[in-house]
Image (cartoon, rainbow, N blue to C red):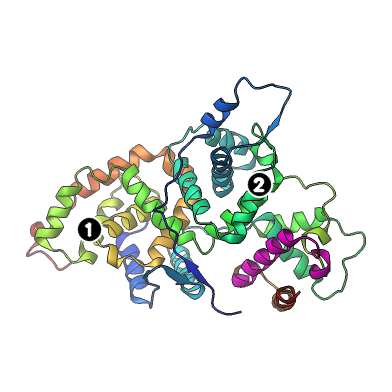
Amino acid sequence: MSETLYKVLDFGRPIDRQSFGEVMDEFKGLSLSHNTFTLSDGQLKTLIATVFTYGLHYYEVPEERRELLLKAILEGKQPLFDLSQTFARHLINNLDGHAKLQLEALQIIEYDLKNPLTNELLVDFVEMELLDQTTSYRKWEYGRFSMAYLAAHLSIQDGWENVEKTVKEQKPRPEVYLKNFGKELENSRYNLDAHEQLLLHLIVKSKLWPDKSALTDYLLAGSITQQHLLGLSLRSEKLASTLKNALQNLPTINKRRGGPKL
Amino acid sequence: MIPSEKLLRYLEDLAKEEHPEINGKEYSQSQVILAERLVRDLQKAIGIASQKPKLSRRRAFIVILEELYYDVPKYPNDLTLDGIHRRASQRFEFSQRSLTRFMTPEDLHPKDPCLFYENNGLKMGNYKVAIAHLLSYSHIYFQIEEAVGSLKKTYTEILLC
């Protein structure tokens, strides 16, 4: 087969942010004799984004807790599930002709909203057209999106001006700066897991030196986020304070001047 | 905990390799495959566990059916999807949904797709897309080389029918 080329996702097109709970509210009061409903374009996309998020992250919890996970996603209980739901909406905006036809075909079917995973045709579509690409050739794009999303979610902006000022004035070599940052993250008081250290490292690297971030960095970040989103969500506050403290405590190059060569 | 020097060394190594840069509006399959190899090595080196490949249930079934039956013209009469489902779940990560009644191996991965999908353009389209993706990443999804060869042959055929 000849070399396959992929188009980079266009995140510039507008997306809707309707939650699953809001969709459910729209059906409140309708006859209970019906279990299934046809959905508007917006409602269908919300259902797809929800099933996508479950499909991407269910294996982070053991089988007996997956129902709870689904419930948490449906009810918007964890802030970071929004990361994958938003990514799914952008993916839908970027579907190719063939997948768009399938999406159109899905618009005339009725859905059981109480049991989203029982909608076989929709789940197949989500797996085949959205999840398979997100876990393979678009994993790096998911990673790049995650890094941008997480930088905002973890309030990297707090104190970032200082970081930029230091970098601008002292012009540290990126590898020296990142090494110091890595050392700081290793400090046991932060108590970070290996993947959390790595992810924060990659986020800071991509924000400070975007031209030094390669596809491999994004792929690695994508891999971590796909595997650990629930954990990252549960530890959001801890990660945000770690990021802030680690950046503040970073020894500047001046302090190190004259010291041993790093 | 990863010692930062170790981590940095690996990150630097990543940067030294002829790593795929992101430029413009397109990227190629070979860029992705190279990056995947580098990341896998790094994850292994710093002890971040990797997992079974994730794959949609439908594609996972196609992989298993092809590996088991690539060299016979017809599936055994008594073949059901239950056994295929079991094998597929051992190899791949996909949500453990219950099987749709009446779905047969032939429905999922027909031995003569041109004939099977003769009157259903959309389903044929789905099938083509499903196979194309499996072939692009056959190094991840397949364990039996002959099955990849035979699936390629099928793919060429369905492009012509």
Residues marked 2 and 1, same chain: yes
Tell us which disc is closer to us: 2 or 1.
Answer: 2
Residue A46 position, x and y percent, is 54, 40
Task: Confirm whether the magenta stretch covers residue B116.
Answer: yes
Range covered by the magenta-colored residues:
B112-139
Residue lying at 7% horizontally and 65% vertically, measured from the top left: A258
Looking at the image, the residue that sits furthest to the top is: A29
Badge 2 sits on which subunit?
A: A
Give how far across and how far down residue A101 sits, in percent.
63, 55
**Is mark 2 in CB contact (under 8 Å) with mark 1?**
no
Residue at the spot of label 1: A180
Lateral position of residue A139 relative to residue B51, left or right: left
Mark 1 residue type = Asn
User: In the picture shown, does residue A248 fall above or below A69?
Assistant: below
Q: Is residue A91 left or right of residue A212?
A: right
Picture disc at residue A106 = 2
Asked if residue B94 shows in the view, the reply is: no
Dot 2 lies on which element? helix
Q: Assess whether residue B135 is covered by the magenta stretch.
A: yes
**Front position in the image: B91 or A168:** A168
Residue B28: x, y in percent? 48, 73
Q: Residue furthest right?
A: B77
- Give the quarter of the image for residue B66: bottom right
Residue type marked 2: Leu
- The quarter in which the N terminus of chain B is drawn is bottom left
